[in-house]
Image (tube, helix red, strand yellow):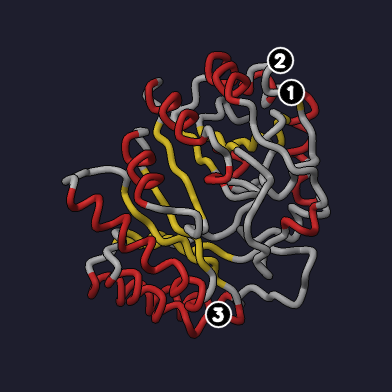
């Protein structure tokens, strides 16, 4: 079905210093935990992913060994990315991220006022990167798009450009636990994406837009989610859909197993997957 899983989304922690209104974290009711560094090394010794995204239902920078985790993955020629809310950053932390070998560094926002609160942190990051004449990490702004913030998106993109951000990533909001936060309909989404593409060209920003949703989705086709306690699940929206222990079984063996095949076969009937728009 799917030959290999080269993309790992690794959840360093479920702890977070914020309580964002659009986030599903509070609804998932999961224990607070931090991924063990020795376990992480074992995970990479057992598997050979080409890409690791360090983000999940928590703030990665709360993990005091996140820099070591990135550096270890980088030493194994694995491309690494990290998404942060940015609030914990200071010059020392930024320099440690730079020296870790991190390839992609994204600030996650969903409102202009959130961007304003971390604008100095973003500017410090981009200025230090210029000062040290670094090619990597590439600095992104990761924007969650939904009905309530659609009119703020152009303003957020313009401000990001002024702060020295190199690329913009837009992704759809999906929160099946709170229907008060609505995703855009196809017509509104197409209009917004057209405007943002034009604006990005004007500002000379690279732009990444979400693809049309499919079932099975691209997330399940190309990636796998590994929780802080090394549980393998198909996706971050299914952290309790336990498939196997990542420290006991190779991920490629997991995705060839009958439980995984059954999950993929029945995705269109799954209570979460059948509603997903990511």
The tag on residue 248 is 2
Left or right placement of residue 164 versus residue 61 in this view = left
The tag on residue 181 is none
- Secondary structure under badge 2? loop
128 or 277: nearer the eye?
128
156 or 209: nearer the eye?
156
Left or right placement of residue 146 versus residue 162 in this view = right
Q: What residue is rendered at 72% in x and 59% in y?
A: 24
- Residue 162's image quarter? bottom left
Query: Mark 1 = which residue?
Result: 245
Which quadrant holds the C terminus? bottom right
- Residue 136's image quarter? top left
Q: What residue is rendered at 60% in x and 81% in y?
A: 148
138 or 95: nearer the eye?
95
Q: Distance between the residues labelled 2 and 3?
A: 43 Å
Which quadrant holds the N terminus? top right
Q: Distance between the residues labelled 1 and 3?
A: 39 Å
């Amino acid at each position: 079905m799917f030959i290999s899983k080269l993309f790992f989304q690794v959840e360093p922690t479920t702890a977070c210093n914020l309580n964002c209104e659009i986030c599903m974290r509070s609804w998932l009711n999961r224990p607070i935990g931090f991924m063990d560094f020795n376990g992480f090394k074992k995970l990479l010794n057992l598997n050979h992913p080409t890409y690791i995204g360090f983000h999940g239902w928590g703030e990665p920078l709360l993990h005091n060994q996140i820099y070591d985790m990135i550096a270890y993955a980088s030493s194994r020629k694995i491309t690494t990315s990290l998404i942060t809310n940015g609030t914990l950053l200071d010059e020392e932390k930024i320099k440690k991220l730079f020296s870790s070998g991190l390839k992609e560094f994204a600030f996650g926002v969903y409102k202009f006022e959130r961007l304003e609160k971390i604008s100095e942190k973003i500017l410090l990051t981009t200025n230090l990167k210029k000062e040290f004449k670094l090619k990597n990490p590439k600095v992104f702004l990761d924007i969650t798009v939904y009905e309530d913030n659609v009119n703020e998106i152009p303003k957020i993109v313009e401000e990001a450009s002024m702060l020295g951000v190199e690329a913009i990533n837009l992704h759809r909001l999906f929160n099946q636990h709170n229907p008060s936060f609505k995703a855009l309909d196809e017509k509104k989404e197409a209009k917004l994406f057209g405007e943002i593409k034009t604006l990005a060209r004007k500002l000379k920003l690279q732009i990444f837009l979400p693809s049309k949703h499919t079932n099975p989705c691209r997330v399940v086709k190309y990636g796998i989610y590994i929780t802080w306690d090394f549980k393998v699940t198909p996706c971050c929206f299914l952290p309790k859909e336990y498939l196997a222990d990542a420290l006991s079984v190779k991920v490629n063996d997991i995705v060839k197993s009958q439980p995984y095949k059954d999950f993929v076969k029945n995705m269109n009937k799954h209570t979460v997957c059948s509603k997903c728009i990511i």
